[in-house]
Image: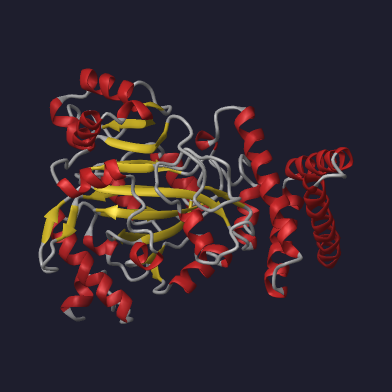
Amino acid sequence: MSNEAARDGGCQVPKTLAQEAYIQHVSKVMDAAGWPWPRELVLNPTKLPHFVDSVDEFLKVLQFGDHMDKIIVFPDGLRKLGQDAALHPALRKVVRDGVALTGYDVLDELSSQGVLNEWKGAVAYLDTRDPSNRKESHAQGNRNGRLSDKFDDLKKKCPQDARTSVYLSEIRSHAYSGAAIVPGLHSNRKSTLQCTMRERASELGMNVQNMLYWDDFSEGVFISGGGAGFDLHQDCIQTSNVGSVFSGHKLLAIWSYPADTRAVLSDHYGTNLVPPLLESQAKALTGACAIALAPPGSVYIFSGCNAHAVCNIGFDLASDGGSVKPSLCVSSYEAFANLHETHALALARTHDEQFHYKKTWMKGRADLREFHEDVAQFLRNCMGQVSVSQEGEQQRALRAIDTVLRNCPRIEAYIQKLERKERSSGKRSSSNSTGSTSASTTSSTRAAGKKRKRLQSQHT
């Protein structure tokens, strides 16, 4: 066995160019970080991420691909997509200045810029007075709130030596921050990004209406220093995530859905897999189906159905490309569900105990109802796109829609409610242009419904 094979998990590492470059990069960065997760796991060839290298390939995977139990990484994706300047100017300044290296420092910097009162999110930290503690504490509770209030509480509660573990999550505007930069996507939003990934994909020619779900309205930014992490969990809705890494490295592990996900959550739900790992955590990591180190400037995709945990790596490559330097970890996420039947079925099984770990569910029935209503509207929009889509895309959309509706009658009931409302609205306003548009949409949706019923009959 070669030294390389022995180092990297006991078998030969695949020799694609993307994987070779990835392994060299990972080794350099993780050497500097002290390998917070075991080298033999991070570089295990059976756990490596999959790679895409072009905008067209990325958009195709995003809209149609099956990424369950996989992590898809698009190196240099932000630049290639034209999304590298999407971060809010206040956050860009914090990253550029390089003074703040922890989540606590970021709150302090943003406070001096006067924006904390305008944004909300969640703030967590690990109380390091107990070395075995892996359950995070929260500033002012675990629900999102105004960051100025969170910071005031954090200053009172967080021990001095725990400030390096502060993790800011789901940062968004407290009030509406304006309309989408692409007309027609939504009238306003709370995202702090200058341009969301959904808006960028639309600008690049992707029909973003032809998706089962995509939340860029209020999805947020996540920030911490190196060694801080986000706890092991499954998302509260069974959708996927498209992540953007603006600074630092994102070390991510996922577990196969649903069996391994359920097993690891039963033992380790809500714990942070940060250094130094407990023996039980290191053992749990051996069961991960994929582990990826997403570099700065990359975009990546994975399913939130997979149990997942993050440990941020606070290093970037220096301008000379040969050395590393300390940095913040700054990323953003948007939840989506594409047209692949695997992800359509997962979406429909949100809050199904057999597939969705109950402790991760949304807190109330009202939240689930709102989610189903949102999905119903997305499906209505998707149905309206069928008549103008290419034949292959039509079939994929119809099968995905059919999969959701056959497995979640509540969503179908909400669609029927929307259809009744639109027909009623069309009758009241048939003499004006809005009524004409509504009638056209309803007609397209009815046509899609007939095609879906024909497709349904092929299944039975």
**Relative to 42, does residue 275 appear above or below in the rendering?**
above
- Label count reads 0
* Horizontal relation, residue 46 to residue 429: left or right: left
Towards the viewer: 26 or 320: 320
Towards the viewer: 103 or 47: 103
Residue 278: where, in percent of width, then height?
24, 43
Q: Which scheme is used to colour this image of the protein?
A: secondary structure
Q: Is residue 460 shown to the viewer in this render?
A: no
**Quadrant (top left, top right, bottom left, bottom right) of the N terminus:** bottom left
Who's the residue at 12% across and 56% down the image? 325
Residue 427: where, in percent of width, then height?
89, 41
Who's the residue at 20% across and 73% down the image? 6
Residue 49: where, in percent of width, then height?
38, 66
Towards the viewer: 275 or 381: 381
Who's the residue at 65% across and 61% down the image? 341
* Horizontal relation, residue 398 to residue 234: left or right: right
**Relative to 380, does residue 39 appear above or below in the rendering?**
below
Report which quarter residue 320 is drawn in: bottom left
